[in-house]
Amino acid sequence: MLKILKRKSRPLGKDRTGIKVGIPRFLNVWSTHQFWVGFFQYLGVGKIIFSSETSEEQYRTYGKGRITMDSCYPVKALAGHIGELLHKDINLLFVPMIYSLPSFLKGHVLDTLSCTRVMMSVENIKAGFLRERDEFKERGIAFVSPFVPFGEPELLPKYLYEALKDHIPYLTLEETGKAVKEGFKALESFERRMREKSLEIIRWCAKNQRPALLVLARPYHMDPGIGHEIDAEFQPYGYPVLWYNYLPLEDWLLEWLFGQEIKAGIIKSPFDISDVWTSSYSSNTNEIIWGAKFAARLPWITGVIRLSSYECGMDQPTFTPVQKIVESSGTLFFKFGELDETKPAGSVKIRVETIVYYLDRYSPKIIEEKLAKLDKIPPEITK
Ligand code: SF4
């Protein structure tokens, strides 16, 4: 889907409406897109265009033959996104090399790095468009790929200014700094709304004693061409689906779920994952582990759906710990691994029917047993 967004008023009087920015909807752009919208809107560019969601057709039409290395499918799919944007009305192709990520776990973990393939994907895929000739130059499109350490936000203005100063007229470091602040505001506001929605779902489950599912995956498995909408298959059966990266973080809720372990000295705070994961460098991995802990404790999450892509080296070491965390609480665990460009529609349908059978059968007992392990239900949950 193509998104053309309205421009906000701009602090300086120089016209930038002729700048048309294309951004591929790939990898960790899925968790940071609102930052980029807020950032470029503040700078007053004329248009921001995201590529479509990943699809087999996009990959076949624009991406195949551009791949210069073997990799997981989410990285390969970037070639389709870049190729598609080359056919749009843009003059600046902005493909961030995201080194580290914003994370609510920052300060509780060792780091919030992105997967190295996320960062390196940009240069690798770009090479496929330079192999025979410079396709960007040929189409009058500037390719801009700044280093983006979201984990050190104070460095962002410098890196983004350096990358964009030759492409955005009259840009200053100070203005870039203000645009970065606007970007974070937009991202935080979006995440707040998503977390509020999740809390609404949890409250509904609590009031009606109904089960829900939690998805543990990478943020880009929300892309229908990467995660194949497996989560959506459960909704017709009456199972609301939560995503680990937008869980509610209210103090009273986390105190209820993790308070006993904090008092017992097992963890230092609700965001502490050191009891189950010591090498907490990768942002998405840390949040997946935390999501597994949350799912294991929240009574109304009776099943976890784990998604993973073909050839994902980052997920491999987490499979067993995540499954153990979830299953040790009696919560059901189901994994859909090795996902690539083709949706395994038939086998997904059969598996979903089987999973729903188990969920229907065991959910009431799981809710009851998980409730019995916790203190009294906080009144805020049924508000
Ligand atoms: S985390 Fe896995 S799927 Fe994502 S870019 Fe890294 S290797 Fe690929």
Image: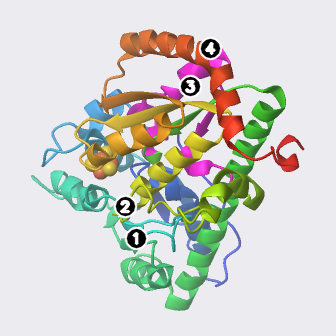
- Which numbered mark, 4 or 3, is in the foreground of this view? 4
Q: Secondary structure at mark 2?
A: loop
In the figure, is residue 102 to the left or right of 347?
A: right
The amino acid beneath tag 2 is Ser
In this view, 41 is above or below 30: below
Distance from Cα at disc 4 to Cα at disc 3: 17 Å
Which of the pair 228/208 is nearer the observer? 208
Q: Earlier in the sequence, mark 3 or mark 2?
A: 3
- Mark 4 C-beta to ligand 1 under 8 Å: no
Which of the pair 47/269 is nearer the observer? 269
Q: Earlier in the sequence, mark 4 or mark 3?
A: 3
Residue 82 position within the rendered picture, expressed as x and y whole percent measured from the top left: 33, 49
Distance from Cα at disc 2 to Cα at disc 4: 35 Å
Instruction: Read off the magenta span.
Output: 220-249
Would you name the residue on which mark 1 appears?
111
Q: Secondary structure at mark 4?
A: helix
In the figure, is residue 74 to the left or right of 199?
A: left
